[in-house]
Amino acid sequence: MFSCDPNVDYEPLIDGLTLPDEKDRHVLAAAIKTNANVIVTNNLKDFPNDYLASFGLAAKSADDFIADIIDLNHDKAIEAFKKLVLNRRNPDLDEFEVLDNLRKNGLTDSANYLHSFI
């Protein structure tokens, strides 16, 4: 699902953009209009880096983006992860089970990175 500030008028840009899947053009238009630096998507094949770079953008997978966030501040990331584990209910999982769930959901690098600090 895509959401954008309703006050940002990105629609006029859509028709002038070229992506492998034209249904993704609204994402790029909104990113351009809001001066974003990164489009976070697991659909990387439909967001060519060379084309995005012409707008000052890059595309990253969710896993790469989260790993970058962890790298920005290890201490805060570990603190947030531990809070997530402590507040996890139904089912109640320990740190390693949560990490395994992250891996199963495609966040392998992020989970491995967090694991290296535990």
Image: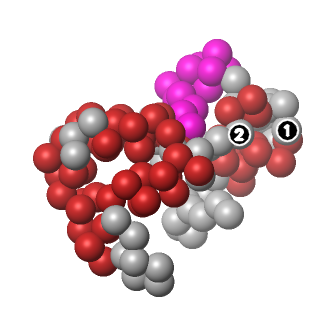
Q: Quadrant of the N terminus?
A: bottom right
**Would you say residue 47 sits in the magenta stretch?**
no
Residue that label 2 marks: 43
Give me the C-alpha separation between circle 1 and circle 2: 10 Å
Q: Is residue 36 left or right of residue 113?
A: right
Q: Which mark is residue 21?
A: 1
Above or below, comparing residue 84 to residue 107 in the picture:
below
Asked which secondary structure carries label 1, the reply is loop
Could you classify mark 2 by the number of other residues whose Cα lies within 10 Å: few (under 14), some (14-19), or many (20 or more)?
A: few
**Would you say residue 53 sits in the magenta stretch?**
yes
Residue 118 rendering spot, x and y as whole percentages: 22, 46
Residue at the (65%, 61%) spot, across then down: 2
**Disc 1 to disc 2: CB gap under 8 Å:** yes
Residue at the (41%, 44%) spot, across then down: 111
The image quarter containing residue 84 is: bottom left
Q: Earlier in the sequence, mark 1 or mark 2?
A: 1
Residue 36 rendering spot, x and y as whole percentages: 46, 41
Specify the amino acid type for callout 2. Asn
Q: Nearer the viewer, residue 109 or 94?
A: 94
Identity of the residue furthest to the bottom in this view: 90
Q: Is residue 100 visible?
A: yes
Could you classify mark 1 by the number of other residues whose Cα lies within 10 Å: few (under 14), some (14-19), or many (20 or more)?
A: few
Magenta stretch in the rendered image: 49-61
Above or below, comparing residue 23 to residue 116 in the picture:
below
Q: Nearer the viewer, residue 44 or 20?
A: 44
Identity of the residue furthest to the left in this view: 75
Specify the amino acid type for callout 1. Asp
The image quarter containing residue 37 is: top left
Residue at the (76%, 33%) spot, across then down: 46
Frontmost of labels 1 and 2 is 2
